[in-house]
Image (spheres, rainbow, N blue to C red):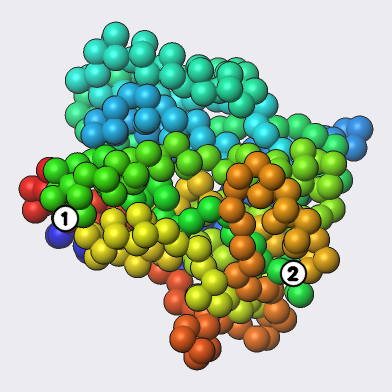
């Protein structure tokens, strides 16, 4: 079986609906938002008008990126999910299944980076499990969970977007996928697009946090009502994120492809690997649904902290479907269950790209 025939990345809607959606363990009334496709944060209502938000993600240990960058992804991809509530994460659990090839000194260094990045965003590490596993050759070294607690009415929910909401997108497309591809295959990328563009792609790696985007959008929860919903851009790219947001909130959507933000850096790197930047892993960007009256306020707040933000479409009645306008023509938006980034990465490895 080739890599293109394998199930790569997150499971799709059919598998989710036939398994997890109908088998969610013991039913507890206080669980306000449990597992749902396109929803990255669970909400549990606690006594005293408080809600607890939880999100989990894989942890990264990618040799081609190094220990510091891998730790950054491990912390910030979870933080990006939590950011969609309008709050920063507060507590973290980490489960590490480390390869035996990793030395104890390397582990200490990796963990020091995890610690530092958690300190930077205010996360207390509360526990987990750490061990070394024979034949563990994956770039996924385990999993983690972040938790936040806040007054119930201040937690944004991935199902709260409404018909008529404007859709905003911060930064550019495919930031994380193109940065990782450039850092993983430096010789190939430099040969094809030059050293300057290669370096710009690598430098964009640390733009893969969207925590500041989300907290600025709600002005650190002082204007939480300006935002209906947020969805960070991960697998499936910005179009996948918008599709998931519309699906979770039971809305239709119309997106203008010409308004979607892309930089020459991400565009050129995607061309090397035969990728459509609109559908690639794009950690660092945030999709924001808001009422039309609030859109310019949010864009202005983000601009004051040097985060670009543009309007790309709006939510419609669910009966209208999920539409993409390209070159003046409206068509159904295609949703890809497999993010093309994964296949592109493995194909590059198979070709011996350096």
Residue 53 place in picture, x, y as percent: 70, 39
- Could you tell whether 289 is left or right of 205 in the image? right
Q: Height in image: 209 above or below 193?
A: above
| Residue situated in front as seen by the camera: 216 or 111 | 216
Residue 272 in sight: yes
Helix or strand or loop: what does disc 2 sit on? loop
Category of crowding for the residue at label 1, using alpha-carbon neighbours closer than 10 angstroms: few (below 14), some (14–19), many (at least 20): few
Outermost residue, right side = 48
The quarter of the rendered structure image containing the C terminus is top left
Q: Height in image: 251 above or below 22?
A: below
Name the residue carrying label 2: 165
| Residue situated in front as seen by the camera: 262 or 162 | 262
Residue at 47% over, 21% down: 114
Category of crowding for the residue at label 2, using alpha-carbon neighbours closer than 10 angstroms: few (below 14), some (14–19), many (at least 20): many
Residue at 74% over, 69% down: 165
Residue 257 place in picture, x, y as percent: 50, 75
């Amino acid at each position: 079986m080739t890599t293109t025939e394998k199930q790569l990345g997150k499971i799709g809607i059919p598998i989710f609906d036939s398994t997890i959606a109908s088998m969610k363990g013991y039913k507890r009334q206080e669980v306000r938002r449990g597992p749902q496709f396109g929803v990255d944060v669970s909400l549990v209502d606690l006594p005293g008008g408080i809600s607890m938000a939880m999100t989990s993600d894989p942890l990264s240990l990618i040799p081609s990126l190094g220990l510091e960058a891998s730790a950054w992804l491990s912390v910030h991809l979870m933080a990006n999910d939590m950011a969609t509530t309008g709050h920063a994460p507060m507590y973290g659990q980490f489960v590490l299944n480390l390869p035996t090839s990793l030395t104890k000194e390397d582990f200490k260094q990796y963990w020091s980076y995890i610690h530092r990045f958690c300190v930077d965003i205010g996360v207390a590490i509360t526990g987990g499990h750490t061990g070394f596993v024979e034949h563990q050759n994956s770039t996924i070294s385990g999993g983690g969970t972040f938790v936040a607690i806040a007054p119930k009415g201040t937690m944004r929910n991935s199902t709260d977007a409404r018909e008529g909401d404007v859709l905003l997108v911060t930064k550019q497309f495919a930031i994380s996928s193109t940065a990782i591809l450039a850092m993983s295959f430096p010789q190939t990328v430099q040969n094809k697009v030059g050293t300057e563009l290669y370096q710009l792609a690598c430098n964009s790696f640390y733009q893969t946090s969207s925590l500041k985007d989300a907290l600025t959008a709600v002005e650190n929860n002082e204007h939480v009502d300006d935002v209906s919903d947020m969805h960070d851009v991960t697998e499936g790219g910005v179009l996948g994120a918008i599709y998931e947001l519309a699906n979770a909130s039971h809305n239709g959507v119309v997106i203008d492809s010409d308004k979607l933000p892309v930089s020459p850096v991400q565009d050129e790197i995607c061309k090397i690997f035969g990728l459509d930047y609109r559908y690639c892993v794009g950690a660092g960007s945030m999709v924001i649904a808001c009422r039309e009256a609030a859109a310019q306020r949010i864009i202005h707040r983000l601009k004051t902290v040097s985060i670009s933000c543009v309007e790309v479409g709006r939510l419609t009645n669910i009966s209208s479907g999920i539409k993409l306008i390209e070159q003046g023509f409206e068509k159904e938006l295609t949703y890809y269950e497999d993010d093309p980034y994964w296949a592109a990465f493995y194909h590059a490895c198979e070709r011996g790209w350096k």
